[in-house]
Amino acid sequence: MKPPNMTCPAEECGPECCVVRHGFQKTKTGRRRRYRCRGCDRTFTARTNSTYKGLHCSSTKFDLVAHLSVEGMSQSAIARVVGVARSTAIRWLDRMTERARVFNERHLKNVTVRELQADELRTFIDSKKNEKWVFAALEVGSRLWLSTVVGRRSYRNTEALFRDVIRKSDEIAFALLTTDGFVYYQRVIWNLFGPAVLYGVVQKTRREDRVIRVEREERIGAHWRIREALLESEDSETLNTSFIERLNLFIRHASSYLGRRTLCHARDEERLDDHLALVQWYYNFGRSHAALRFGREVRTPAMQAGLMSRKLTFRDLFVLHIVEMFQSMEHEEGVRKSSLVIDSVANLLEEKRVGDAA
Ligand SMILES: [Zn+2]
């Protein structure tokens, strides 16, 4: 019998460890293959070390909870629809968001930023008196949602947003930046980027929810350089904040915490921040973007930015770290062997390796 294509999850064991089949684990819905490591004598299943670990139901149900929550459904509604206790849904969501945060951190990097838009949207924690802001920054060409910061509308948070953008990008010197007229943007951008950057402001005056006047102002960089950047841009003809406004709309719809008239304001800032990590993952990696249609293919922002070769599913998110673990250990062989891992994930790795070689 062919040895199982499995790697021991224990830290001291590597992918070289010999793993054998070890009967089955009984589950509610059937049985799950169990394995034993000959090195450390531990037994495990494909779920060990994945986000599904210890789950007493199907992974499909778990995935569904993730999906509903990024489509803007509240925790109580999810619990009712899926048929689990609210406390269970909350516990699962905590695990998912934590996982999404790690994934974002690991994969949103070396992004080429040519055109960046930043904006902030307002929300409340607990009561109308406790106003909070969600800052977001978007790379226009790929529609990649790079960074987000939740907190007060302060210099510090504005700076944190752009520092995060710098950390995740490979080059930013000649980027075109556009924001609204919020006072701290210009100071932060000047302090972080200096005169090399091109920066413009779009101010909209509203009356009764309707935009009655749009003012565009070039703030940093010579007029001809900004014009040149706009001519090169495939997306913008004039200074604008349309793309980030579209993202803000998406964020508002995707997070039940942010709906304008809703019962479920985020209990605390942390919970909102956590949930946004999952929403950000979904937007960048798990959802085709209508503006990124190329013939038959509709790409995700991560594909357009060259970070991923295909659209990911929640399942990928929840099992991928097993592969990542071995990647980071640089066990090339291990990567091939450790297919605890669903086929799709294995494909992804193959594609990634081809990409690396090229
Ligand atoms: Zn072992």
Image (cartoon, rainbow, N blue to C red):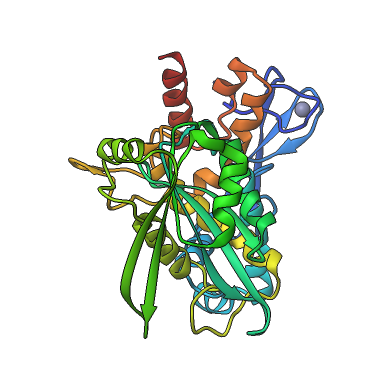
Task: Residue 194 in the image: state x and y as whole percent.
Answer: 56, 37
- Visible residue check, residue 29: no
In this rendered view, identify the residue nearer to me: 109 or 70. 109
Residue found 51% across the figure and 58% down from its top: 279
- Going by the image, does 264 lie left or right of 269? left
Task: Residue 345 in the image: state x and y as whole percent.
Answer: 48, 35
Ligand 1 sits in quadrant: top right
- Going by the image, does 179 lie left or right of 192? left
Residue found 49% across the figure and 76% down from its top: 259
Relative to 237, does residue 135 appear above or below in the rendering?
below
Task: Residue 188 in the image: state x and y as whole percent.
Answer: 60, 49
- Visible residue check, residue 309: yes
Task: Residue 287 in the image: state x and y as whole percent.
Answer: 39, 52
Residue found 63% across the figure and 35% down from its top: 322
Q: In the rendered view of the protein, which quadrant contains the N terminus?
A: top right
Relative to 233, does residue 62 appear above or below in the rendering?
below
